[in-house]
Amino acid sequence: MRLDELAKQIGAEIVGDGSIEVTSAATLEDAQPGQVAFLSNPKYQKQLETTRASAVIVASGVKEASAALLKAADPYYTYCLAVVALHGFRKHPHSGIHPSAHVDPTATIGEGSIVYPGVFVGPRCRIGRGCILYPNAVIYDDTLIGDRVIIHAGAVLGVDGYGFATHKGVHHKIPQVGNVVIEDDVEIGANATIARAALGSTLIAKGTKIDSLVMIGHGTKVGAHGLLVAQVGIAGSVTVGHHATMGGQVGVAGHLKIGDNVTIAAKAGVMADIEDQTVMLGIPAMPAARARRVYSVFMQLPELMERIKQLEQQIEELADSGDTPIV
Amino acid sequence: MRLDELAKQIGAEIVGDGSIEVTSAATLEDAQPGQVAFLSNPKYQKQLETTRASAVIVASGVKEASAALLKAADPYYTYCLAVVALHGFRKHPHSGIHPSAHVDPTATIGEGSIVYPGVFVGPRCRIGRGCILYPNAVIYDDTLIGDRVIIHAGAVLGVDGYGFATHKGVHHKIPQVGNVVIEDDVEIGANATIARAALGSTLIAKGTKIDSLVMIGHGTKVGAHGLLVAQVGIAGSVTVGHHATMGGQVGVAGHLKIGDNVTIAAKAGVMADIEDQTVMLGIPAMPAARARRVYSVFMQLPELMERIKQLEQQIEELADSGDTPIV
Amino acid sequence: MRLDELAKQIGAEIVGDGSIEVTSAATLEDAQPGQVAFLSNPKYQKQLETTRASAVIVASGVKEASAALLKAADPYYTYCLAVVALHGFRKHPHSGIHPSAHVDPTATIGEGSIVYPGVFVGPRCRIGRGCILYPNAVIYDDTLIGDRVIIHAGAVLGVDGYGFATHKGVHHKIPQVGNVVIEDDVEIGANATIARAALGSTLIAKGTKIDSLVMIGHGTKVGAHGLLVAQVGIAGSVTVGHHATMGGQVGVAGHLKIGDNVTIAAKAGVMADIEDQTVMLGIPAMPAARARRVYSVFMQLPELMERIKQLEQQIEELADSGDTPIV
């Protein structure tokens, strides 16, 4: 593809020779002639001078590089468009439902959806159009999935919620008569698990992207356009607003209400409701500015202990010296 | 079903009209006429006044509601019985071993057990009666499973323990010649993994319920009637007593002894033995009352630092003022 | 097998009767006559006096036991050799590619490799010789796997990296055009997930052993001979040196550089680069000696608060007594 053709397609402004040919995308560090790289993290700015890439997608402010520049207001998004233009998405080895998949006769699967070998789709499931179910994904009965949803290998949707009534020391299983609802454009990572609701529905709203090994408890509702990074665990009956971002290994206790546009840093432990627009951090999770102050003192605890010892010694000396004149 | 019939079946006392028809269970918030709801968490008590449910299962003390009451000593357990009575458990789409499952000819599977498509049962496994193995569960060789055990989709039992002898910088695999034993009435969550013992058996004792994505290390023995919530990880050679409860993402280090009736709060990191009847919390895990005091000060660390600074200033002033008279 | 034959095979020195027959390995505690046990952890030394084992593998310094001794410089490694000699590794129920596995016609699988039922191997994958792919493992397209690699049940290699460009509040999927490369002698645990690189390769270098439910992010490179214990999560674009050891549930943030011979204690949260030879601990992870001091004070925080209160009271008294003479 000619660089000027690419630039037009991705809406970038060329600084340099638009007639060169580009074939693929690469990192600034690894790029070879004929490749397009990008700079979105200023930390790697120095590599602009040494990259062998033929062109680099950059923010508008960038002036010079050893390569042609493709200037864009949102360089990471423009890079995304470039990778789509140059590489496209995966070409699947088959279309439709693979004969080695097991789809219950009462389930329906929309047009253009691809079901890989080893997938199980249970009774009464409804799967929309343009979905991809990768190998060995398991969709329990009654799960409803919208359009263009991607379910990665080994993910399990609609497994029984963890609901037991303990009576005289024995845990009795409560039938989990709810289901799981996945809206359009959701992506679910490999080996992630989403429990069906005890009653009603567990919901993953449109556009939310869930990473590998995430666990969503029964009856929890995750709002639209969320980002849940790997190994996040959300207990049951939680409500998460739209545009939530949770870093890896975050845990959220049950029955909480997490607002809109909330960001929770990796590994945090959320034990209370969170208001809209809040950034949270720590175990237990605190508003980030507060948490940074707490952890800053935490990491100085040995010195703080020394200061207390010194204070105690000074006090004793003062008390002693104060006694003397009296005697 | 008539309400009085349901009440009789679940052992509840009716306050209201027993002749009404009820068809299903729902939450207080979502219930419609014809549905039965329940109140076990006092936090939701206000919904008693507004619920549209036809009947609500409540504790004996509750007086009034907009619906008929079903009074019970243990309302959550009674609700469990009501859901069973009204909905029953999942009706499976097939019986016995599905032809797409792979059961080794040397394995035995008891009467009434259901094996879904994609399940693998390895050589010499013995699976009891009335078990359910959901799609793509994998049971490695020599695993012994009792009666009425439920293994959810993608769970892996009997995988090699993580045993390596490191010699001159190279990790040599130690054959894991033990197995996994699962007693009666255990439930294992989706994509959970239970490692086989290096020698002897990894054991999950009767009635223990394990949630999704839990990891149990090799040689560990989990006592009867435990509850291990999602993403718990227990290292190898741990002994856990009966009636243990571990919240989500708890981690337990290897070779420890956890007593009976121990509760460990979510995300805790257990690094030492725990006595019977103890509630533990925190990283590292401490007895809960102690941990609450520790975390209470932890969250006030910035203010504590201010108090130390103020003390230092006061001491300096005192020392200065103390000097003056001497001069 | 005669004990002296075993001793010769594993390079141990016999103290006792070499003519006895031994048949299998067991723990010191469980061993019966005819079995070989081992002592590597001094904590269990007392069991030497009571074990019913016929022989015990011990370090050179050990003097006496109720059994014959097999003295070795590295008893745990020598025990490993003994288990291999007495038990060998798993005998697989079939050879080659099981007909219930799905291997894409463009993939190649080396001589002596075993592919269990339900495994998926995608287009253009190359798998070396002597590998074992356990049931329901999923290998996405273009994954390259060396020789003698073991992939446990349900593990997913080459799943799309978690790469999205967020534009006007919508997350756009970035094609993940890289792949996963697994070098020789790597072992990957059950239900672990390794994401393919956005560009280039995610790498697990030779001899590294990965436990169950571990998550490796896209573009991350894990050096040779590492040990990643269960539920570890490493974000994307991380570089980990050789001989890394990470305890269970460790989390590593993205774009970091972890040196060679680094050990990270269980549950630690790594938020910054780590130099070679460092032992790290804590959330956030700190060099271990430092972390131990920090956590030691942390666990005394209630007492520390008391000391501050007492200091404040003493200061007030001193200030008061200082005032008196002036009046």
Image (cartoon, coloured by chain):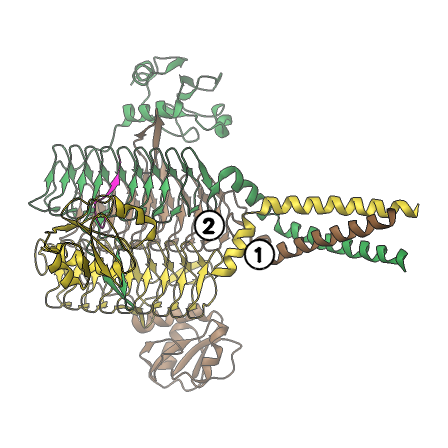
Chain colours: A brown, B green, C yellow
User: Which stretch appears magenta?
Assistant: B196-205
First-in-chain label (2 vs 1): 2
Residue B295 found in image quarter:
top right
Residue C42 position, x and y percent, is 33, 52
Determine the secondary structure under disc 1. Answer: helix
Picture layout, residue B164 above or below residue B264: below
Q: Amino acid at mark 1?
A: Arg
Magenta stretch contains residue C317: no
Please, which chain is the residue tagged with disc 1 on? A
If the image is split into quadrants, where does the C terminus of chain C sit? top right
**Residue mark closest to the camera, 2 vs 1:** 1
Please, which chain is the residue tagged with disc 2 on? A
If the image is split into quadrants, where does the N terminus of chain C sit? bottom left
* Neighbours of disc 2 within 10 Å: few (<14), some (14-19), many (20+): many
Of residues A93 and B158, the one nearer the viewer is B158
Q: Amino acid at mark 2?
A: His
Q: Residue at x 33, y 71 (%)?
A: C199
Residue B266 position, x and y percent, is 43, 43
Labelled disc at residue C25: none
Does any portion of residue B218 appear in the rendered image? yes
Which residue is labeled 2 in the image?
A: A242
Furthest residue in direction left, as rendered = B105
Residue C185 position, x and y percent, is 22, 66
Residue B275 position, x and y percent, is 41, 37
Determine the secondary structure under disc 2. Answer: loop
Magenta stretch contains residue B198: yes
Which residue is labeled 1 in the image?
A: A292
Q: How many numbered discs, if any?
A: 2
Of residues C292 and B112, the one nearer the viewer is C292
Of residues B274 and B24, the one nearer the viewer is B274
In the figure, is residue C240 to the left or right of C185?
Answer: right
Magenta: main secondary structure equals: loop
